[in-house]
Amino acid sequence: MLSTYRRGVLGIAGLKPVERLLTRHGWRLGVGRFVAGETAPEALPALASLRASGREVIVDVLGEYVRDPAAAAAMAAAVAAAIDTLTQAGVPAVMSLKPTQVGLALGEDVAAQHVLALATKAEAAGGSLALDMEDVRYVDGTLRLLQRAWQGGAPRTSGVLQAYLRRTPDDLEAMLAAAPDPNALALRVVKGAYAERPELLLPDMPAIRRAFVALVERAWRAGARVNVATHDERLLAETAAFARGAALPPGKVEYQLIYGVKPKLQQALADAGQPLRIYVPVGRDWYGYFSRRLAERPENLGVVLRGLTG
């Protein structure tokens, strides 16, 4: 149920001449607004600035849809190096990982090896790993990887649920049933951003918003910690009201917003004392991520157009 605007931008971004142009001139055209650096050391000043302003961070070393075992191993090594960089800089190694960047498309065993190694490394450093959710082909595999991480000794590994998929309430119930301790479970709830077949999706934005709130409230009632990941101020207000009314204990709610998107809203939440974490992408494989950010809002596309015109 992507809007015409979003479908149009994603379609244009998929054209090879456009990809070559943006890849060649991306930093001049505004990539730096949404990606903190091409390496973790380059991103450290941005991370320090965010933390100084009362915002914590979750770092994503960008990459997705890797289909070669050597490339998957290289991506896992890059994430491991980022964990070391953050730890040495005194930044908690809270990481987000797309399973396809470490080989889920090659098979669950390939990805599971890397996921468990990275999750245990992050936890040993005082952080944690979140398994991001990708397009619907990989939802079941990602949920199984999450369970394998828990069973393999990385209990703080967290998952993500996409509200726009019709199947997601069942996925939440399965996640709650599989968690070693639902009261220790952490999960991120998002609206969803991938282009999927219409029959897999809820019909419109009001339905997605209702589903989002229902998922958050169900998870909280089960004792989980929910990372409310949205820039939709209506959803932020509604979930915050529920959290206050339910008198949730500390640590059961966190708001997660994206680096470079609605910075005034981010600072307002931080100033209000809301637990806030900013999703900060780093890495050279930024094109797919950047394209999705442009497709979200016309204002984001304006960043590129201003770069083109100087």
Image (cartoon, rainbow, N blue to C red):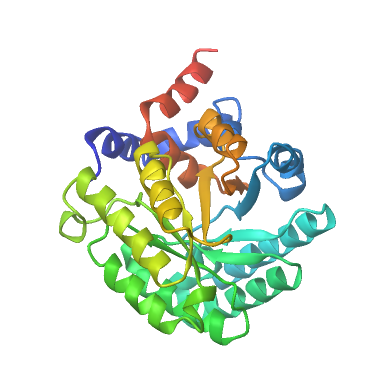
User: Residue 6 at what x, y percent from top left?
Assistant: 30, 37
Q: At 71% from the left edge and 38% from the top edge, which residue is drawn? A: 46
Does residue 200 appear to the left or right of 17 in the view shown? left
Q: At 27% from the left edge and 32% from the top edge, which residue is drawn? A: 5
User: Residue 156 at what x, y percent from top left?
Assistant: 60, 73
Number of marks drawn: 0
Furthest residue to the top? 310
Quarter where residue 305 is shown: top left
258 and 224: which is toward the camera: 224
**Residue 200, relative to residue 290: is it above or below?**
below
Quarter where residue 122 is shown: bottom right
Does residue 53 appear to the left or right of 181 in the view shown? right
Q: At 59% from the left edge and 54% from the top edge, which residue is drawn? A: 60
User: Residue 28 at what x, y percent from top left?
Assistant: 60, 25
Q: At 36% from the left edge and 45% from the top edge, which residue is drawn? A: 238
**Residue 222, relative to residue 248: is it above or below?**
below
Quarter where residue 32 is shown: top right
Q: Is residue 135 visible?
A: no
**Residue 168, relative to residue 308: is it above or below?**
below
141 and 13: which is toward the camera: 141
Does residue 86 appear to the left or right of 20 in the view shown? right
Q: Quadrant of the C terminus?
A: top right
Furthest residue to the bottom? 151
Q: Is residue 142 visible?
A: yes
